[in-house]
Image: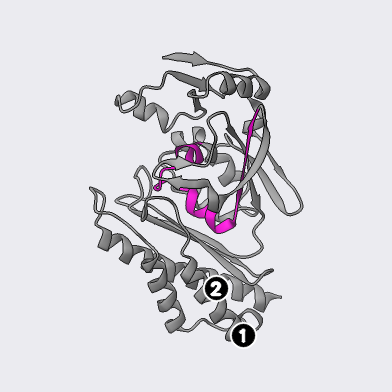
Amino acid sequence: MDFLRPASWEEALAAKAEYPTAVPIAGGTDIMVEINFDHRRPEYLMDLGRIELLHTWETGEDVVRLGASVPYTRIMENLRAELPGLALASHTVASPQIRNRGGVGGNLGTASPAGDAHPALLAAGAEVEVESVRGSRLIPIDAFYTGVKRNALAADELIKTVHIRKADGPQQFSKVGTRNAMVIAVCAFALALHPETRTVRTGIGSAAPTPIRARTAEEFLEAALEEGGFWDSGEIITPSVAKQFGDLAAASCNPIDDVRGTAKYRRHAVGVLARRQLLWTWEEFRAGVRGG
C-alpha cells in the first residue's frame, strides 16, 4: 500500500487525477477500521490532513459552506444555531475521540446508509461541492447516493465542501441503537420544517440500501399543514395527522433483517421517530409563532 500526502488542495487534485484509485483519508474513522480488520486493502491511501481549507467553514447570509473535514465536535460547538439538525446528529456519533476526528466528508465518501450525518443533510437539502483538475460541481444531496456504499463522485473527484442552508425553522434528529453513542444506528430519522417555503423535508438512515427521504410523508404533511391553516394559526397538530405522517414515513423504508435489527422493527421505529419529531418540531414552531 502506497501513502500519498499532498500539502495543498491543488496537489491533492493532481494526485487524485494521477492515482484515481487512491482512497482519501481525513479523520480515518471509517477506512482505518476496514483496513485493521483486513476488509479492505487499497492500493493507495491519500492523507488529506494537511489541507487547511477542508477544516474550515464559512457562514454566509443564507448558507454555511462546511469543509469536508470539519470535525463533528466543531459542528456541535459552533454551528448549533445555523445547522441544528446536523448538530444533533453530530452528538450521536460514536465517542468524543471519534467526534474530534471524523467529519461529514467521510460520511459522504463512505456513503454507508447507516452514516449519522446523512438524514440531517437530506432534511436540510444540502449540496455537495466536489472538485477535480477538470473543475468543480455541486451535487444535490438527493442525487448523491447511488447505491449501497456508492456515491456520485467520479474517480478523479474529491469532496471539498458541503453547502447547507441555514435553518429557517425547527429541525430534529434521532436514532435507535443499543446505546446513544458508540453504536451503528439500527435506524435514524431527521426532520426539518422550512416555514419560509412552507415545506418539510425528511431523512432516513439505515432503513434502505441508501439514505432516503420519506417523500410521500413530506407531501402529505405539507398538504395537511397548508389545508388546515396550521402555518398561520400555529394550532396544535391533530393526532391523526401525526399518526398518518409516521405511518407514511415507515412505509417509505426498504429495510433488511441483520444482526442489529429486523426489517419489521426498523419500519416500526422509523414511524415512531417520525411521529415524535413532528410533535417536537411543531411545538418549537408554535412557540416561535406565539412569541412573535
> Callout 1: few (<14), some (14-19), or many (20+) C-alpha neighbours within 10 Å?
few
**Residue 173 in magenta stretch:** no
Residue type at mark 1: give it.
Gly
Magenta stretch? 106-132
SS at circle 1: loop
Q: Earlier in the sequence, mark 1 or mark 2?
A: 1
Q: Which residue shows up at 43% across the image and 32% down it?
A: 29
Q: Which mark is residue 229?
A: 1
User: Marks 1 and 2, how far apart in space?
Assistant: 13 Å
Q: Dot 2 corresponds to which residue?
A: 282
Seen in the picture, residue 179 relative to 248 is either above or below; the reply is above
For the question of whether residue 86 can be seen, the reply is: no
The residue drawn where x is 67% and y is 69% is 197
261 relative to 188 in the view: left or right: left
- Residue at horizontal 31 percent and vertical 60 percent from the top: 266
Q: Nearer the viewer, residue 162 or 174?
A: 162
Q: Quadrant of residue 17?
A: top right
Q: Residue at the location (42% across, 18% down)?
A: 43
x, y percentage for residue 27?
Answer: 49, 30
Q: Nearer the viewer, residue 41 or 235?
A: 41
Quarter of the image containing the C terminus? Answer: bottom right
Residue placed most toward the observer, 245 or 148? 148
**Quadrant of the image occupied by residue 270:** bottom left
Task: Note whether residue 250 is visible.
Answer: yes
Q: Where is 188 relative to 111, above or below? A: below
Q: Residues within 10 Å of mark 2 (few under 14, many from 20)?
A: many
Q: Is residue 156 above or below residue 174?
A: above
